Amino acid sequence: MNTGPGLRERDNAATRTTSQPRTRVRPRAWAELLLIAGLFLAYKMGRLLVDGRVGESYANAKLVWHAERALWLPGEADVQHLLLTSDVVIRAANVYYAVVHFPATIAFLLFMYIFRPEHYLRFRRILAWLTAAGLVMHLGFPLAPPRMLAGIGMIDTAAKFGPSVYGPPQTDTLSNQYAAMPSLHVGWALVIALGLITATGSRWRWLWLAHPVITMLVVVGTANHYWLDGIIASILVGALMLVVGRTRKQTGSRPGKRAAKRAGTSAGEPVRAPAPVAVPAQLRRNLDYLAAGEAAYLATFGDTITDAGHPQTVGKPT
C-alpha cells in the first residue's frame, strides 16, 4: 500500500498553488489600442494648449541656457559642431529624430504585450505617467528650443539639411514647438531601454542603453532640446520606475468581484493564502517511512495502517 508519496505530492502541490502569486492577465488588445490612441491624442492636443506664450517661452529659454552654464554642463553647440563635420552624419541625426521616436515606442509596446505580458502593464503605465507629467510641464514651463535662439552658435539642422518634421512656428498648427521641457524623446527612449533590460535575460541586453544615449546626443546636436530637457526627463523616468515598481510589489494582483465573492473577501482586499495544515509529527514520520519503501519495511516489522486512516506506531528493530 503505497499512499505516502501520493499524499505528500498532493500536499506539496497545494502548498505551491497557494504560495505562488497569480500572474496578471494580458489586457484586451482593443482596450489597449483605444487607450494608447487616447494618450496620443491627448499628447498632441495638450501641446497645442501652450501656443500663444511665445514671449514666456523665450524668457524660459534664456533661464535654462544660463542655468546650464552655471552648472558647468557642456555646450550644445559643441555637439552640433561634431555632427556638422559630415553631411551623412547630420542627415542621419535628423532622420533619427524624425523617424525613430514613435515607431520605436509602438514596437516596444507590441513586443511587451505579445512576448512579455508580465511586464507590459508596468511599462505602459510608466510611459503614460511620463507623458502626463511632460504635458503638465509643457503647460507650466513653455520653452523655446535652442534652434530658435540667436547668438548661441546653433542652427536648425533639420531645416537646412532635412528631413524636417516642423514647419514655421507661426503657421505650424499640428505641433507646439515651444514645449521642449522635458524631452519626451529622451524619456520614452529611456523607458524602452529599461523595459527591454528588465524583460530580457541576454547578457547583451544592457546595449539597449545606447538608444537613450544616442537620442540625447541627437536631440541636443540637432538643436531641438537642451541638456536639461533630457536630464529632467531621465529623473522623471527614474522616479516612475521606483514608484510604479513599488506599487506593484505592495499590491500585487487583485481579484475581480466574482473571485473575491467566492473567496469571501471584498474586491479591494488582497486574497490571503490559507493557513498551512498542521500535520502530527508521528504521521509525518510514518509517511516518510512509507515514501522510502514502506512496503518492505512494514513486511519486515509487521506494522500496518488501520482502516480509519490512523497510523500505528512504527517501531525500530530490536
Image: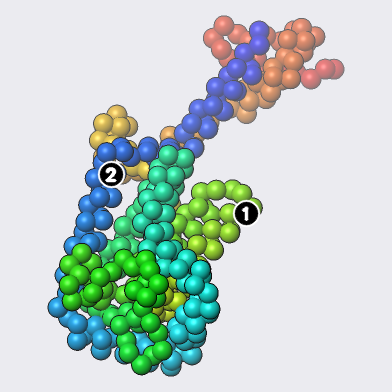
Q: Position of residue 105 (x, y in %)?
A: 39, 54
Q: Quadrant of residue 181?
A: bottom left
Instruction: Give the residue displayed 43% in from the left and 93% down from the top.
Output: 70
Instruction: Give the residue displayed 58% in from the left and 14% down from the top.
Output: 310
| Mark 2 lies on residue | 33
Q: Is residue 46 visible?
A: no
Q: Position of residue 10 (x, y in %)?
A: 55, 22
Amino acid found under the numbered disc labelled 1: Trp
Side of 115 where 292 appears, left or right = right
| Mark 1 lies on residue | 204
Instruction: Give the residue displayed 40% in from the left and 85% down from the top.
Output: 154
| Label 2 element class | helix
In the rendered image, which quarter contains the N terminus? top right
In the rendered image, which quarter contains the C terminus? top right
Side of 106 where 199 appears, left or right = right
Image: 81 above or below 46: below
Amino acid found under the numbered disc labelled 2: Leu
Q: Is residue 16 visible?
A: yes
Frontmost residue, 86 versus 55: 86
The first of marks 2 and 1 along the sequence is 2
**Mark 1 and mark 2 in contact (Cβ < 8 Å)?**
no
Whole-number angstrom distance, CA of label 2 to CA of label 1: 31 Å
Side of 190 where 50 appears, left or right = left
Q: Position of residue 200 (x, y in %)?
A: 55, 48
Q: Position of residue 176 (x, y in %)?
A: 23, 70
Residues packed near mark 1 inside 10 Å, few (<14), some (14 to 19) or many (20 plus): few
| Label 1 element class | loop
